[in-house]
Amino acid sequence: MSQTSYSVEAPVAFAGMLAQFDATTKSSISRASEEVSAVAFGKPAVAGTDSAKQFLLPSGAGDLFLGITVHMFGTEDPTDDGIANGETAELLRRGRIWVIAEPIVALGDAVYWRHTTTPGAWRNDATDSVLLPTAVWASTTTAINSLAVIDINMP
């Protein structure tokens, strides 16, 4: 089937894209995905079975937060929409990154990561979520499930 329509404009941003790149302030770690299914970009990553080597999506309030999955091109996931099982990913710990905000958020709101109902969603309230005290929303949204920037500052 041939393509019948196309856009000449690229999207402004996408989940997992770095919103600001400054090598002097950006900090990240690498871990392999322990999830059976592909993990989407811009999601919270928590410690896997071996916290020094693996990560998972959140499943409980007591999970150890590691960072936010950073987008990368050429992943091993055949659909190229996430991080495949066993694939090593970059997890942002300090910097600014685009994610999908589940509710409407405002500049300066607190950041929460969801562990139940829709694990891996980002919020600005404690609904089935855990506060990420080292982060704030660095942009505002006007609709639910919209792109927004998180400013994270973990040691």
Image (spheres, grey):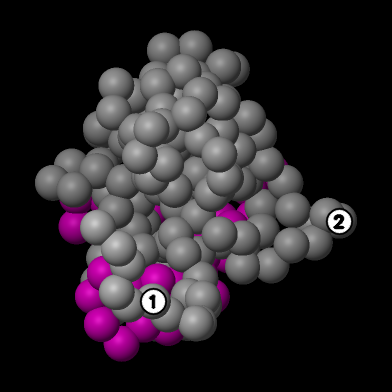
Q: Quadrant of the C terminus?
A: top right
| Mark 2 and mark 1: Cα distance apart in space | 38 Å
Query: Going 51% across and 35% down the picture, which residue do you hit?
Result: 75
- Do we see residue 123 in this rendering? no
In the current view of this chain or complex, which residue is farthest to the bottom? 142
- Do we see residue 146 in this rendering? yes
Secondary structure of the residue carrying numbered label 1 = loop
Q: Is 132 left, or right, of 101 in this rendering? A: right
* Cβ–Cβ under 8 Å for marks 2 and 1: no
Nearer-the-camera pick, 72 or 32:
72
Instruction: Return the mark for residue 6.
Output: 1
Q: Position of residue 69 (x, y in %)?
A: 50, 44
Q: Amino acid at mark 1?
A: Tyr
Give yes or no for residue 19 being in the magenta stretch.
no
In the current view of this chain or complex, which residue is farthest to the front? 2
In the current view of this chain or complex, which residue is farthest to the top? 50
In the displayed structure, 40 sits above or below 99; it is above
Q: Which residues are magenta?
A: 126-155
Q: Position of residue 116 (x, y in %)?
A: 18, 42
Q: Is 12 left, or right, of 140 in this rendering? A: right
Query: Going 66% across and 58% down the picture, which residue do you hit?
Result: 95
Given this view, does label 2 or label 1 mark the residue nearer the observer?
Answer: 1
Q: Position of residue 144 (x, y in %)?
A: 23, 75
Query: Going 51% across and 71% down the picture, which residue do you hit?
Result: 13
Give yes or no for residue 143 being in the magenta stretch.
yes
Q: Is 96 left, or right, of 67 in this rendering? A: right
Nearer-the-camera pick, 44 or 111:
44
Query: Going 25% across and 82% down the picture, which residue do you hit?
Result: 143
Q: Amino acid at mark 2?
A: Thr
Query: Mark 2, residues whose alpha carbon is within 10 Å: few (<14), some, or many (≥20)?
Result: few
Q: Which residue is mark 2?
A: 24
Upstream in sequence: badge 2 or badge 1: 1
